[in-house]
Image: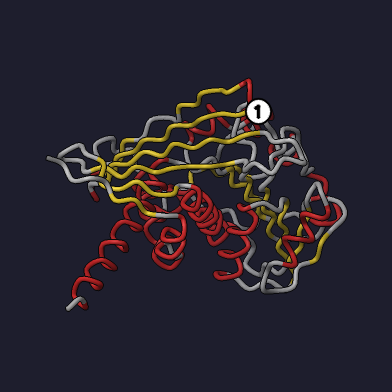
Amino acid sequence: MSELPVLISRDEVMRFLQNEDLIPRLEAVLGKFSERNNAEVIQPLRTTIPLQKYNGFLGIMPAYVAHEDILATKMVSFYQRDKDSVLPAHQATVLLFDPERGNVRAVMDGTVITEKRTAAVSAISAKLLMPARAEVLCILGSGPQAVSHYEVFTEMFSFREIRVWSRRRERAEQFASALQGPVTVCSSVKDAVEGADVIITVTMATEPVLLGEWVKPGAHVAAVGACRPDWRELDDALMREAVVYVDSREGAAAESGDIILSGASVFAELGEVINGTKPAEREKTTVFKSLGMGIQDAVSAKLVFDQWKSQQLRANTKAP
């Protein structure tokens, strides 16, 4: 008989998933993915089921990382909510399997995993691509992804100024007041991004909100929203003038409206930069189009599960 799966809560995932442990694992698996060895990393494109009645989608993201023997899948729902809705825009659950037996070893909150691994990959893109003397950080959006990005970017880098903009100013003010450090709330996207060295877009926009004419030459943009082929965050001018990096070429070609609708060409995957097979064009304006990958969820889930097991071992050792 297979053992019942472990249930790992949101709070536990939050506690176990620390950036200092997560980021090296994400860098390693991104590099492995870009080697294109199908025996090492197996990750089909995300399967998406439209929920037209509720203006949402259900995504299924399986992955197998052979060299670490990690088999996992994430189920994530995402919705275009009305501005006054109290319902979450994203929710997720991750299943971690025993690859040999085929049984589920753990069921864990995937929303925190999504937030933290997405922000961590954006931070990796900034480490590789942002200007050498980046002083001004701008965040467009004020939801959970904005919070996770603020946390990892202020943990990894030092900025002289941090700005935020949101469609609803009160949301931006709530975001700023809940943080540890000073954040300037801006009234317009233009005011927020002008002169910024690093721009993070974490919006639910379906039409461009960031225009290339506002972006400082040499800035780095981490574009996280617009995960559907007909959604946009960035305009044509920015997409065509910037050097574009992605997490997955196949994912970008199928899912990124910013790339598909602008006709922009992809210069490299982050994994190729990590592997040294493509250069980091720091002196130019760069865009990292993030879509998220099942392998990122898989290594995150394995880290959480390993930390959970270590905690259980310590607790059992202390027991009389």
Most extreme residue toward the front is: 320
Relative to 84, is 316 above or below?
below
Q: What is the x, y in percent for residue 305?
A: 31, 56
Relative to 14, is 261 above or below?
above
Residue nearest the observer in this picture, 202 or 33? 202
Q: Which quarter shows the C terminus?
A: bottom left
305 displayed left or right of 228: left
55 displayed left or right of 27: right
Question: Which of the 4 image quadrants contains residue 232?
Answer: top right
Residue at the image position 55 percent from the left and 54 percent from the top? 122
Q: Which quarter shows the N terminus?
A: top left
Please rate how many residues cluster around mark 1, counting C-alpha atoms within 10 Å: few if below 14, some from 14 to 19, many from 20.
Answer: few
Relative to 105, is 129 above or below?
below
Q: What is the x, y in percent for residue 306?
A: 28, 60
Q: What is the x, y in percent for residue 116?
A: 50, 56
Q: What is the x, y in percent for residue 217?
A: 75, 54
Residue 268 in view of the camera: no
Residue at which label 1 appears: 263
Looking at the rendered structure, the kind of residue marked 1 is Gly
Relative to 225, is 29 above or below?
below
Q: What secondary structure is marked by label 1?
A: loop
Residue nearest the observer in this picture, 250 or 176? 176
